[in-house]
Image (cartoon, helix red, strand yellow):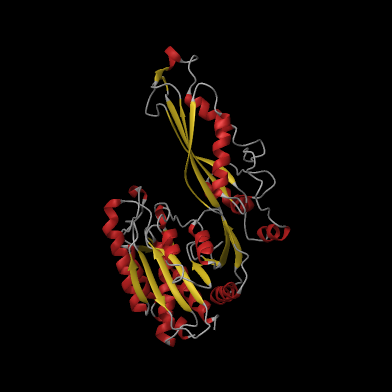
């Protein structure tokens, strides 16, 4: 296949280009990197033009969207929309990086840099695949539209409006996204499910100011104690979320789906060692992968109250706060879950304190059946590139914009990830397999060829 040969001939060049992009600290969450984020968009736009795309940088209320198009396919050919993001997470804590986060370094076959796998490396392999096909064949078997945003790491606040405003221009037969992982090294994977999210904050207020615990303790309700009692009642003894109606719309796994999960090359002990816990836990009646992929959860993400510095300070705190996230599965609706949570937490509030519950942000769960011409072409391409049939997996995390694409454009989403477990996507020492970067580009080129 000429396109594959083009990619193999230019492996070193393409890796050097990616390193150049990774040197731009496009941290969307930090205002001091606003110019860097714009520079990363400009850099990508120029590389996309070199690849043969018509490119436009479209301003939003935040960071811009890079829109690339090639619409020269034969009449009746499908249109694929490729989505990704060029912004990256903050690099802190810097002292935990082995090499500089924005000075890419290859070690043991892995490319270490902030944004290497999330998502610059995975975006760029799509650009190179299209470039290879156009360079060798002069055409593509499908029209292609790239929508690469600069705000995914801060929740994509402006992308839904962008999609709605440009829905006609962005009409497509499928949305292709590479921002996920393979199940294991050498095992290509298609992701068919993502959990949604409802992220909440509980604020408990007691006395108007911190008090001496000796002078007032026993006569004043302690907000920290009250919050602890509330949190303790959010699960039952079986590990289930103890909110009325929480499970009413949960779509249960079918026997076939549970059988498919059980056949994956997974060892529970390996997961335990990976996370460093003395034992694994969760909802009774389900294995670890089922709990992570297909069951809803409620977790405390942060607690704050009273004195937490060195030494002792006998204070009865005036207030306490907890951050709580709930991961959701089909067919739960995050807005409904927010309401359930607020009502239930308020009902648990003891006398002597006031409780305020805030919904901070959320997103809907997503699931795809994994069938259709584009899914079939992707499965064939992955098998051709890796020499193994792909497995269909889910992920426990959330990419809320996936559901927005499906709802706004009415097109199925195909998630093909080329990351690997343990890649530290939001942590120090983020990395991407160099082999996966190159082989991923070849697989995407094969996907297009499979649509002929």
Residue 440 against residue 245 in the figure, above or below: below
Residue 91 against residue 103 in the figure, above or below: above
Left or right: residue 419 compared with residue 373: left
Tell me which residue sits at (60%, 42%) in the image.
279
Place of residue 355 in the rendered image (x, y in percent of width and height, measured from the top left) = 49, 30
Q: How many labels does the image show?
A: 0
Tell me which residue sits at (40%, 84%) in the image.
135
Place of residue 97 in the rendered image (x, y in percent of width and height, measured from the top left) = 36, 52
Left or right: residue 311 compared with residue 395: left
Left or right: residue 327 compared with residue 310: right
Of all residues shown, which one is farthest toward the top?
215
Residue 69 against residue 306 in the figure, above or below: below
Task: Say which of 146 and 36 sits in front.
Answer: 146
Q: Quadrant of residue 438?
A: bottom left
Place of residue 262 in the rendered image (x, y in percent of width and height, measured from the top left) = 68, 58
Residue 187 seen in the current view: no
**Quadrant, the C terminus:** bottom right
Residue 174 seen in the current view: yes
Task: Say which of 197 and 301 sits in front.
Answer: 197
Tell me which residue sits at (40%, 70%) in the image.
124
Place of residue 99 in the rendered image (x, y in percent of width and height, measured from the top left) = 34, 56
Q: Quadrant of residue 59?
A: bottom left
Residue 239 against residue 426 in the figure, above or below: above
């Amino acid at each position: 296949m000429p396109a594959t040969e083009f990619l193999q001939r230019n492996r070193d060049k393409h890796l050097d280009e990616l390193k150049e992009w990774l040197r731009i600290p496009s941290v969307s969450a930090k205002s001091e990197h606003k110019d860097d984020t714009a520079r990363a968009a400009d850099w990508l736009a120029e590389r996309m033009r070199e690849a043969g795309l018509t490119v436009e940088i479209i301003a939003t209320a935040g960071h811009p969207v890079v829109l690339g198009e090639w619409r020269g396919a034969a009449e009746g050919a499908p249109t694929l929309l490729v989505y990704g993001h060029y912004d990256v997470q903050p690099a802190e804590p810097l002292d935990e990086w082995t090499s500089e986060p924005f000075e890419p370094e290859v070690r043991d076959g892995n490319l270490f840099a902030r944004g290497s796998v999330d998502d610059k490396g995975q975006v760029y392999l799509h650009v190179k695949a299209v470039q290879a096909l156009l360079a060798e064949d002069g055409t593509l078997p499908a029209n292609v539209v790239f929508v690469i945003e600069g705000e995914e790491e801060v929740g994509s606040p402006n992308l839904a409006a962008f999609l709605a405003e440009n829905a006609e221009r962005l009409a497509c037969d499928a949305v292709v996204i590479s921002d996920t992982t393979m199940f294991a090294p050498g095992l290509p994977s298609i992701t068919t499910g993502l959990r949604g999210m409802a992220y909440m904050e509980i604020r408990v207020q007691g006395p108007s100011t911190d008090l001496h615990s000796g002078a007032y303790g026993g006569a004043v309700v302690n907000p920290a104690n009250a919050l602890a009692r509330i949190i303790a009642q959010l699960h039952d003894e079986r590990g289930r979320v103890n909110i009325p109606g929480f499970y009413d719309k949960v779509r249960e796994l079918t026997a076939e789906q549970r059988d498919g999960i059980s056949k994956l090359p997974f060892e529970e002990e390996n997961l335990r060692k990976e996370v460093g816990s003395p034992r694994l836990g969760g909802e009774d009646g389900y294995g670890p992968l089922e709990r992570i992929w297909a069951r809803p959860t409620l977790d405390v993400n942060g607690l704050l109250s009273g004195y937490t510095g060195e030494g002792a300070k006998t204070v009865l705190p005036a207030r306490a706060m907890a951050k709580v996230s709930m991961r959701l599965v089909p067919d739960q609706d995050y807005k409904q879950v927010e309401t359930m949570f607020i009502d239930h937490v308020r009902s648990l509030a003891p006398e002597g304190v006031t409780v305020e519950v805030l919904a901070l942000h959320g997103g809907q769960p997503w699931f795809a059946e994994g069938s259709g011409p584009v899914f079939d072409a992707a499965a064939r391409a992955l098998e051709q590139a890796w020499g193994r049939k792909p497995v269909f997996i889910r992920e426990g995390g959330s990419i809320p914009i996936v559901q927005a694409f499906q709802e706004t454009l009415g097109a199925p989403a195909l998630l093909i990830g080329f990351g690997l477990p343990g890649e530290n996507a939001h942590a120090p020492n983020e990395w991407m397999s160099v082999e996966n970067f190159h082989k991923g580009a070849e697989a995407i080129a094969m996907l297009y060829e499979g649509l002929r």
